[in-house]
Amino acid sequence: MTDPAAAAGRLAASRWSLLAGNFAIGCGVMVVPGSLVDLTRSLGVSVALGGQLITIAAVTMGIAAPVLAAVVGGWDRRRLLTFALAWFAIGHALAALTTSYAVLTPLRALGVLGAAVFTPQAAAAIGRLAPPEARGSAITFVFLGWSLASVLGLPLHSWIGEAFGWRWAFGLVALLAAAAALGVWRTLPDGLRPPSPDLRGWGELFTHPALMAVVLVTALSAAGQFSVFSYFAPYCRQVIGADAAETSLLFAWFGAFGLVGNVLLSRQIDRVGTARAVTVLLALMGVSLLAWPLAATPWALAVVLVPWGLGCFASNSAQQARLGLAAPRLAPALLALNTSAIYVGQAIGAAGGGMIVASGGGAPEAYRPLSWVGLGWLAVAVALSVWATRRMQRAGHG
């Protein structure tokens, strides 16, 4: 007979270790935008070309997440998640040693395969471990790691990149991922294998219009955000004249509100409902991008960033919980596909933003259209989210 106290303690430890894993993954995904100024200077490439490292990583993760979910579906999650973090650590350690953009590009693509596995499978694992009435809050809790990465990782990457160089920022990610791998190995139970959809299950998923619409909402939201966010550091330096310290503080400020938003979501999502939470969070981000052109100084930009920070990471967490609760039987595949949508959206946003910046020759004026492009993506995301909610309610899915 299972001791309830021991089971609760094991669940709590697993939640924290998976949160730490997402923190390491988030730091790794954000290391390029955080240290982009020094990286491009050190490797002698343009900001637009350096920003394509974000696109390359996002495309790789977007394609790999559902493919790898199908391949590793039967693996024990303790071993799978530990291996994914170890792979991520090795990839960033090797990247930190390179002195060539041509070599860094494939290393970046290979290294982020660990992220493609970890994020969705961590959500599926904690959803399996948590009792049904607490699954929404459990999934959003482990996603607090991403918010913490924005609070600590982004400004730290920016500061390390300016003070010591981008390679040290990559090295820090390697250490964090290695430590998180050890934590996951020590806390997750053996034999944890969430049900893996067969070909029929995948077919059911891809032909479900409302579920696929929810996944598309994630992609549209990510495209809108990364149209701007990918070039946040050079925007701060070139357009509003922020120095290195102010840019790092803006990253930290943004991340702090991201953490607040995710904490509030984790506490309220089971009461408010996932669909309503998503709509509110997307609208908050739209408010920031609408007000973006008014921010002509670092202090004004700090004010404009508040709604975006509150909605940014919380919206991804709410989307993961929304899908995990909508179709529990298909949760591993759905969460992998939703993670893929995050990264595909990031790739689209980073690539589109890079084209806009490059077309303007990298001049300060070239960055100004980015917020309007991002706002357009978010407006479509809100409309599609509302449609998907109504469709699922009519079908009896809440």
Image (cartoon, rainbow, N blue to C red):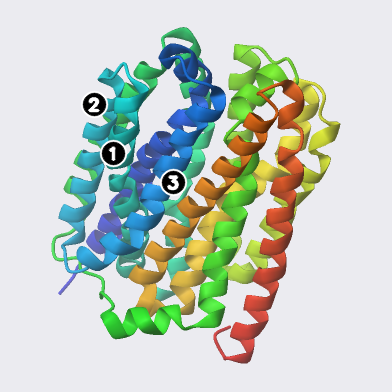
Q: Which amino acid does label 2 sit on?
A: Leu
Residue position marked by numbered label 1 in the rendering: 111
For label 3, the SS is helix
Image quarter of residue 106: top left
Within 10 Å of the Cα at label 3, are there few (<14), some (14-19), or many (20+) other Cα atoms?
many
Image position of 28 (left or right of 377):
left
For label 1, the SS is helix
Identify the residue shown where x is 42% and y is 41%.
56
Identify the residue shown where x is 64% and y is 49%.
224
Q: Which mark identifies residue 171?
A: none
Residue position marked by numbered label 2 in the rendering: 94
Q: Are marks 1 and 2 in contact (CB under 8 Å)?
A: yes
> Residue 65: x percent and y percent?
34, 58
Q: In this view, does 84 lie above or below 76?
A: above
Residue position marked by numbered label 3 in the rendering: 58
Q: Which of 367 and 384 is in front in this view?
A: 367
> Residue 253: x percent and y percent?
64, 30
Image position of 366 (left or right of 100):
right
Q: In this view, does 99 lie above or below 179?
A: above
Image position of 326 (left or right of 85):
right
Image quarter of residue 229: top right
Image position of 370 (left or right of 129):
right
Q: What residue type is labelled 1?
A: Gly
